[in-house]
Image (cartoon, coloured by chain):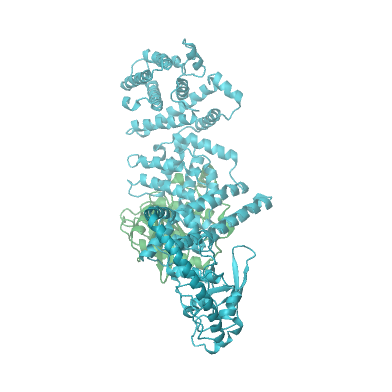
Amino acid sequence: MKKQKVVLLGKGRVGKTSIFKRFLQNEFHDNEVTTIQPQYLEKQVKVNTEKVTLSIWDTAGQERFRGLNPLFYRNSKAAIMVYDITDQESLDSLEDWLAELKNQVGHKIVLMIVGNKSDLKKKRQVSIEDAENLAKKVGAQHFCVSAKTGENIDEMFHELAKRVMKFVKENKTPLNTTKSRRNFALVNEDVETKKKKKKNNDGCC
Amino acid sequence: MNSKNKEMLRYEKKNNPFIRLISPSKQFGFLVKVSQALKAMFVFPLSSTLNEINLSEEFVYTHLLIFDSLNQFITYNGCVGITYQNRNSNEQTQINFKILTKPNPKLSFSNLGINLSLKSVINSIPSISQLEKKTLSRSKSSHLLLKGKIKFKFFGAIRFSLLSSPLYYPNCGWENKIVFEPDNLKNDHSTMANHQKNINQNHKERDRKMEKQKTKEKEKEKEKKKEKGKRKRKEKGKEKHRNKKKLDGWEMVVMKDFENGSVKRNKHNLPLNLKIENIQDLKEFLKRKEFSKIEKYINNFVDHFQNDYIDPHSCGSTVLEFIFSITEWFFENSFFKKCVLIENAKSEPIINNHLEDTIIAPLYPKIMKLMKIKVTKQKNVQFNNKINFLSFIEYSHLEINIDKLETEFVNQAIETLNTLNQCNSPHTKFTVLSKVFFFANKSLTQLKLIGTDELLSILIYIVAHSKLQDIKLNIEFLLNFTDGDYISTTVEGYNLATFISAVIWLENSTAENFGMKPELFEKLQKNYQDLDRKQKGIENKDSKLEFKNNNCTNSKNNIKNEIKEKYTDINNDKTIKDNKHDEKHEDNENINTQNIKKNKVVNLNQNSISDLDFNLSLSNQNHQIISNSNDNSDEKIQEQNKLNPTSDIKKLNIKKNMNKNESKIKTGLEMGVKNIEKNNQQVQKQHFKKKFGKFLNNEINDLSQEEQSELLNLYKKLYKYAENLSFPSNKIL
């Protein structure tokens, strides 16, 4: 099976990069890590007898960098939406990320909502119910992980690989068409116009 | 090896377009002899090399084609075939086989008499028809069927794709001297025996004559040899050296290895020690046919493309398809694969470079002209200006901790990014980008986790500080000429995406990003563009003259005021934000402003004082320091002053209470003057003294803190310029 693109999304400082790094460090079912850059990873995951190569993209989560470039979302088969269980805002911001993802990708993709820092249970602000409700609403699967301890990280990626395989088999699209090669709009919407839109949306209570 | 063999090999290598690997093995030499003697052609499977071939009976039966005429041939197993040229390419030959007769079971090397000891005869080579009559007698070979006992694996010729054509060696002494001579067919058939008897008799007679002649010649030669023995030894030594030189490269290595028997093979049956050092070696290895085919293919396409496609916008997809087809075709080529798979590190970059230089790189610019480009000229120029303008960006603006940053790598990244425009193909551009990312990541190694946030912010800094032009066109180029899947599933694609987002961030950056008033930011940007245009000489000649003659008074003064405001704003912001790193920031700012100024300066001549003044005038723009150009001075100096607005230093309201730093600066300026004195350029010295001496001699009266800081900045910038003028500024500061 070809490489499948997976995008890590979420607010800044929720721990996307640390999840990424943890997955890289873990020897997950003796799979080979093919390519490594601190922000990009290719890893082969075995699902039963089949193998999937996930090319995982870490994205910028800071507000000032949001929505800069649709290339990050393009052709992605799955998205891991990360929030911090000690930060309610991070979960709330996931809806914005989802909206942006829909705008950019425009079709169904595999979604995972992941609550990071599960080792800090005492400082938990986000209830599991809220997160699971959001997951149900969006059609995603919810996981609580800890990048620090490595809890559930492998399981989450294994489940992701499973779902991606299923998704790809169900939605077989012709690859390498000439249309997919080019005609990519470089300039995105201006930041100001987006902000204005946001303000208009957030204006009412 | 004999000298003849060497010559033969060399000739073969030069003239046989099909031969891939020449080895000095006995088998090969034997095959060449046989094929030459028989005017025959050997047919090899594509996957095999000459070294693999075992000279078995089956091989000769199936692979040795004896040509009756130009097109018709027979094999020893009785197959008759016709070769014909492929219409599409002159170099391809196709062969059709028909099995007319069944194989001769007892036809072997031994009974053909073409064992390793071939006899040379004076007579010319018999034609195939003669040979048939004498030996094979195709029509009469049916009798052999009855006596057939040996079972053959191959009744037809094996499928093949590589041909070794028969060659004759006109300058090697081989031509017309070897004759096919069947000796042992007497027992097989009476007709064969009769023929052979006649042949033997003739040969014996000829041999006798030959022997007599040879003995005479030998005697003469011995005498000559004795006389010229010493000379010959010397000559031999020289010849060895020459041969070594000629046989340098892979051929020599391979030959040695084969001789030593130390050849190791990989999966593809290719010697590991094979060295491909030049593109010519590569061509010989890859088979010249393949290379010429590619080049023809490309040339045809380009001609066709230029002539036939009137509307260039309609053929974007075909262009892409073409380029993909070339690269795919080339990479799928079995020879190429083989060559790459050899564990020789040199071969791959040679191939890549050759591909880039000769085939792919020249194509892109041609094709890029014909394609739709979304980036207009205006946008491109605007963006270039903006990036030049934004080169004042500092680490603090991007929230980067300088403590955890290794700036050396950042500078390296900037340097490598500046080479992006030198690359003509997407492959090379991607490699440049990946290098930039490598350095960017290295600069952040002190951070525990390097996420995209950190990477992106450092990348923005790198792009802003690079002098790279036409970034948008570069991105358009990369997006047009790379596969969508490649972008979405490779590191290179990731790098491109982050690079683009950095560019977009810079494009959309507003005053808020830098803590400035938006009105001021816009004004500054516009004014900067105007100034840039003027200094780049985009304006008309008249305006240029005005610009010079008026000493840049009106327009420049306005810009000076505004840029001065800008810098004061930035300084204020800095003092509020980063109290800890004040000194560092100031230095960085100075460096940034210096960069801006450097860009503005046209034709900086370090030794000429006029240029110095002009540069200083530009530096003064930022600080509203205006000097009079009407000072009392020599005629020469007055002439120079026409271009120099720096003498307006008088206009400054210089006040008292110098700081410690100012005293340092003063000494620094004096040092600068001293350095010029050393150069024995009296005119320059006087001029410099007059301008700065006044400034230095004036007591600074009642200077406010802000003005002091301004002055300080100015001095620092002057020192930076002093650096360019080979002043020992480092020692001063």
Question: Is B672 in front, or is B152?
Answer: B152
B459 lies above or below A120: above
- The answer to whether any part of residue A86 appears in the image is yes
In percent of the image, x 39 and y 55: which residue is there?
A: B227
B525 lies above or below B676: below
Question: Is B575 in front, or is B625?
Answer: B625
Q: How many marks?
A: 0
Give the chain ID for the cyan colour: B
- The answer to whether any part of residue B342 appears in the image is no
B373 lies above or below A147: above
Image coordinates of residue B428 in percent, x first then y, are 48, 49
Question: Is B213 in front, or is B326?
Answer: B213
Residue B701 falls left or right of residue B288: left
A109 lies above or below B457: below
Image coordinates of residue B255 in percent, x first then y, are 41, 62
Residue A146 falls left or right of residue B220: left
Give the chain ID for the green colour: A
In percent of the image, x 47 and y 42: which residue is there?
A: B419
Question: Is B564 in front, or is B14?
Answer: B14
Residue B281 falls left or right of residue A177: left
Image coordinates of residue A79 in percent, x first then y, are 46, 58
Pick out the residue farthest to the top. B632
Quadrant assignment, res A119? bottom left
Image coordinates of residue B204 in percent, x first then y, are 50, 76
Quadrant assignment, res B704? top left
Pick out the residue farthest to the bottom. B146
